[in-house]
Amino acid sequence: MGQSQSLSTEVEIQAPPDAVRATFFDFPRYKQWCKWTIDPVESGKKASELKANERIKVNLDGMAFSPVVKENSADCFSWEGSLWGVFTGKHQFYFSPSTKNPGGTTAVQVEDFQGPLVFLMAPGWSFRQKTLDNWDAFFEDLKKEAEQSSP
């Protein structure tokens, strides 16, 4: 079946899950608060209404690709895609009530990678660390934006 690697990161946000999710799904405003872009391929489609098997355009601060939505539920948004034909991955975002901060959210990103160059995501490789740094930067931006926007 081949090699695989899984990466994850999380952040505590002082805003309820619904507020964090609303900030996350406000894709048109991303350019105002982060370096990522996510856009539905279908013009006029609201991000929160995306369904499984619909395509989106994603640019994670220089890594651009067009994955397919796999899940869009109250607790999870995920896509599956390929980067340069050397990685495939399922990227998942979870937004759940915090067990550490009452009224807050624990946001988690997870990606399961497969492909011929998946070893680059193994511990000790710089591509793994750059990926985690990119995710952490997005989460810090999401945290700041959600906390500022939440009543």
Image (tube, rainbow, N blue to C red):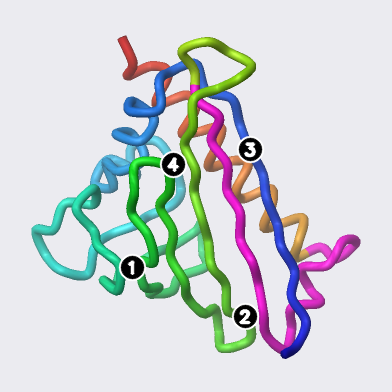
Of the two numbered discs 1 and 3 in the rendering, the one whose residue sits closer to the viewer: 3
Residue ID for mark 3: 10
Q: In the visual, does 100 lie left or right of 94?
A: right
User: Residue at coordinates 52% horizontally, 67% vertically from top-left?
Assistant: 63
Of the two numbered discs 2 and 4 in the rendering, the one whose residue sits closer to the viewer: 2
Residue ID for mark 2: 87
Mark 2 and mark 1: span between their CA atoms? 17 Å
Of the two numbered discs 4 and 1 in the rendering, the one whose residue sits closer to the viewer: 1
Residue ID for mark 1: 57
Residue type, label 4? Cys
Residue 121 colored in magenta in the image = yes
Residue 103: x, y in percent? Answer: 46, 12
Q: Are marks 3 and 4 in contact (CB under 8 Å)?
A: no
Mark 2 and mark 3: span between their CA atoms? 22 Å
Give the quadrant of the N terminus. bottom right
Provide the secondary structure element on which disc 3 rests.
strand
Residue 50: x, y in percent? Answer: 23, 58
Please report whichever mark, 2 or 3, sits nearer to the chain's N-terminal start: 3
Q: Are marks 2 and 3 in contact (CB under 8 Å)?
A: no
Q: Are marks 2 and 1 in contact (CB under 8 Å)?
A: no
Residue type, label 2? Phe
Please report whichever mark, 2 or 1, sits nearer to the chain's N-terminal start: 1
Mark 4 and mark 1: span between their CA atoms? 16 Å
Where does the magenta region start and end? Answer: 105-126
Mark 2 and mark 4: span between their CA atoms? 24 Å
Residue ID for mark 4: 34
Q: In the visual, does 60 lie left or right of 72?
A: right
Judged from this view, the residue extending furthest toward the right is 124
Crowdedness of circle 3 by 10 Å Cα count: few (<14), some, many (20+)? some
Residue type, label 3? Glu
